[in-house]
Amino acid sequence: MKSIISRTLFFLSFFGASLLLANTPSKMYFLNPSSWNFHQIIPSPATKTPEGEARDINFLKDTMAARTKKQLFRALIASSDSIFDYSPIISPAFNANQLPYSTGIFKEVKSDTDKAIHIAKNEFHRSHPTTWSETKKNGTKISGYSYPSGHSTRAFVWAGLLTDLFPKKRKEIEIEARTKAWNRVILGRHYPDDVYAGEVYGQFLARQFLANPIFQREWMLIKEEINNAGIRSLSSNN
């Protein structure tokens, strides 16, 4: 009897711990979304009437019909986005091979950003437009919520961080971020207000990163590595 009780207690403690681990949020490096009120950060999406929904879908269809082959190609390429997509604006030396330490931190930034996007999407529960088609990765259908646009959010996180590094390039960086965001509309993946929410959210997240004391220490090392790689324009005084 004693043996049975011991084994029972063991299994209960084991599976109880497993359940707790399963419900524990994934590690975040620099952000703390649990303290945020998302409805104060991002404007809530407008409740659409059937007529409004039809109007927006027709807008997306018209946008998709008017896109050029060049626009479509660029939009598809940009679906796999990275901070190094901005290299043509910054410098050829701004790349993962030249900046190994920075690349590691950028991966942590992307991880935090992706988790923050997921939490925000689950807060608003907005479905993708019907012009959005499910894609497959490793045979599994990918689906999810639409608001805010994840690609747009990441584009403006990168833009916010890069303009802190390269303020002289602000205009070009912001144009590139907006182009990346609008690509989601060109592809029919997002409503325009999904993209706008991504811009607002991405700018907010960039400020959160830059205000975090741990990130600030990493940021100084990133600036040092970028300087050592011979990439200039790190401040408006250079």
Image: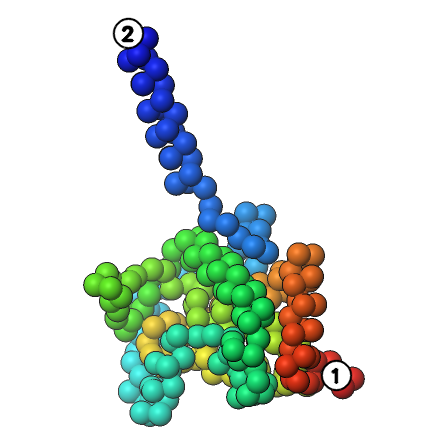
Structural distance between the alpha carbons of marks 2 and 1: 77 Å
Tell me which numbered mark, 2 or 1, is placed earlier along the sequence. Answer: 2
Residue mark closest to the camera, 2 vs 1? 2
Q: Residue at x 30, y 12 (%)?
A: 3
Image height of 6 relative to 39, above or below = above
The local crowd at label 2, few if under 14, some if 14 to 19, many if 20 or more residues have their Cα within 10 Å, is few
Q: Residue 98's x, y, as percent?
A: 56, 79
Q: Which of 183 and 26 lies nearest the eye of the viewer? A: 26
Residue farthest top in this picture: 1
Q: Which mark is residue 68?
A: none
Circle 1: is it few (<14), some (14-19), or many (20+) Cα within 10 Å?
few
Residue depicted at 33% across the width and 24% down the height: 11
150 and 104: which is toward the camera? 104
Q: Secondary structure at mark 2?
A: loop
The part of the image, by quadrant, that contains residue 228 is bottom right
- Residue that badge 2 annotates: 1
Which label was assigned to residue 236?
1
Q: Which of the 4 image quarters holds residue 118?
A: bottom left
